[in-house]
Amino acid sequence: MSSGLSRTVPAVARGARVLTIAALLGVLAACSAPPSGVPTGTPTGSPPNASAALPPPPTSAFPGLACDALVADAEVASFLGAAAAPQPLTIDDAPVLQDGGTVCAWADEAAGTSLTVRLVGDGVDHWATFNHWYEHTDWSASVGEINGTMCSDGACSVHALDGEPFIEVDAAGVDDPNGTRTEELARTALAAAPVPAPTAPPSSSAPTSRSCATALPVDTAAAHLGAAATGASYVSTATPSYHLVQDSLQRVGGLDCRLLSADSRELVRFTVLPGGAWVLREDSPVGAVDAAGSEHSAHARRGDDWVRLRAPGASEETTRALLAELLG
């Protein structure tokens, strides 16, 4: 990966907080951005997205912050082009919202350009994870107090800490080989961000195991999958690059797990988002969830939690049996 990256010792020492990273990394090995799914298995007598029966959407640490206030329309047009338009949020960003964050996205589909800004509080802890991910202790101070800028293959990412807010800016298809323009936009967004308000931890009506093998034991899965699962094992879902989605998922106590066969085929992948059943609401900020069902994928409510499971190549009956095991 090439990089428009410079490293400078930050002005503010944060050693004591960085010590928390050892605990975070143990869970990050099992966390990443979640896969797609289709909902089933709602409570008896409840429609799939009966909002009155579901927990409310999470409280943002930046209440009332609109996307056009975070990055003005003129800034977006200058960065992506005049045809750029706001994009609806997807279910993949649910962990960031559950973490009290704000997500804004724009794209010019015809031009192939896109911009996504994710903003969260508790920035020092997020920075500690980012810093440890790349095993650095010094970065640039070109954005906020300290930042890391990485560009490769027509895409740039900026991660920056500025007091309590932590920002992730992902840009694609933009002429910005060194990340200079992406950094400028990150500075603009951070300047517009208010001081984050405290947020309550998500509610969860069922204990969430922090181990994939405990949540769905390999032997249990193999009993439903048959010979294909001989020699199967769980592997890390962590990506080579830091992503705020997977960091937020582990911070709120979630899981993202992949069970692979002995020849590295994906047998099962599941996600657990504590307190995340709000994604099934009709007024969910991540958009409506299709309730049609799917042969290889299903998700369900477990109390206030959201659970999603995918079993590529398995029958619908096997997929639902595995989901039932996961729900407990």
Image: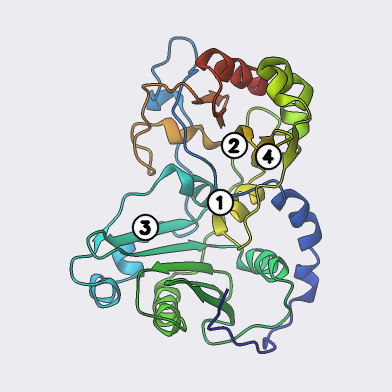
Q: Which residue is mark 2?
A: 271
Question: Circle 2: is it few (<14), some (14-19), or many (20+) Cα within 10 Å?
Answer: many
Q: Which residue is mark 4?
A: 264
The answer to whether one can see residue 266 in this image is yes
Dot 3 or dot 4: first in sequence order is 3
Disc 2 from disc 3: Cα separation? 29 Å
Dot 2 or dot 4: first in sequence order is 4
SS class, disc 4: loop
Tag nearer the camera, 1 or 4:
4
Query: Residue 54 has which mark?
Result: none
> Quadrant where the N terminus lies?
bottom right
Tag nearer the camera, 2 or 3:
2
The amino acid type, in three-letter code, at marker 3 is: Gly
Disc 2 from disc 4: Cα separation? 19 Å
Residue 27, horizontal then vertical, whole percent: 73, 49
Quick check: marks 2 and 3 in contact, CB under 8 Å?
A: no
Disc 1 from disc 4: Cα separation? 32 Å
Residue 294, horizontal then vertical, whole percent: 43, 23
Residue 50, horizontal then vertical, whole percent: 38, 23
Q: Which residue is mark 1?
A: 99
Disc 3 from disc 1: Cα separation? 16 Å
The amino acid type, in three-letter code, at marker 4 is: Ser
SS class, disc 1: loop
Tag nearer the camera, 2 or 1:
2
Query: Residue 64 has which mark?
Result: 3
Which quadrant of the structure image shows residue 228?
A: top right
SS class, disc 2: strand
Q: Residue at x 44, y 76 (%)?
A: 186
Tag nearer the camera, 3 or 4:
4
Q: Nearer the viewer, residue 226 or 14?
A: 226
